[in-house]
Amino acid sequence: QVQLKESGGGTVQAGGSLRLSCAASGSTFSRYRVAWFRQRPGTDRWFVAAMDWRDREPFYTDLVKGRFTISRDNVNNTVHLQMNSLKPEDTAVYYCAATSSAGYYRAQATYGYWGQGTQVTVSS
């Protein structure tokens, strides 16, 4: 029902910033809960941030709270993740995800739609 494509990844020095984007198509995207996850080689895919279609406060993992900001533009069907004060441990492939169903916001299984991922590398 929805297709997602991430962009904006790259290499940045520690302390720098990147802005990831996730373009959505196929459905009424404003009705979907959206999230960002990240995965390092050989590790699990972990929750980063989430936002629903209502005017509720977004959720963040403690590892990024205060540094990352998730936002959405329903007119342009786009989700963003602004990443500031980046650290080497933020290095990972970042995935955009979406769901039209209820579920625990931190769980991968909650989200039925995923993008291909975009690589973020933070050098020291």
Image: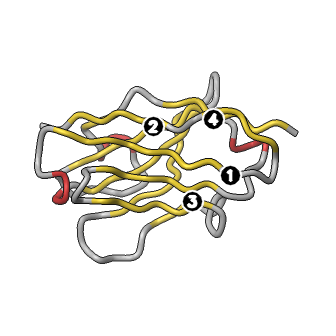
Residue drawn at the location 46% of the way across and 66% of the way down = 59
Residue 71: x and y in percent read 41, 62
Mark 2: few/some/many CA within 10 Å (<14, 14-19, 20+)? many
Q: What percent of the width, then of the height, locates residue 9?
A: 57, 35
Reading the image, the residue beneath label 2 is 95
In the picture of the structure, the residue carrying the numbered disc 4 is 120
Contact check, label 4 and label 2, Cβ < 8 Å: no
* C-alpha distance separating marks 2 and 1: 17 Å
Residue 3 shown left or right of residue 38 in the figure:
left
Q: Choose top left, top right, bottom left or bottom right for residue 104.
A: bottom left
Q: Earlier in the sequence, mark 2 or mark 3?
A: 3
Q: Give whichever of discs 1 and 3 has the lower sequence position.
A: 1
Q: If you read the primary sequence from the N terminus, does the residue marked by circle 1 or circle 4 appear first?
A: 1
On the rendered image, what quadrant is the C terminus found in? top right
Which label sits in the foreground, 2 or 3? 2
> To which residue does mark 3 refer?
61
| In the image: residue 89, left or right of residue 29 | right
Q: Amino acid at mark 3?
A: Thr
In the rendered image, the vertical position of residue 53 relative to residue 43, given as above or below: below
Crowding at mark 4 (Cα within 10 Å: few <14, some 14-19, many 20+): many
- Judge from the rendering whether residue 98 lies leftward or rightward of residue 31; answer left or right: right
Mark with earlier residue (4, 3): 3
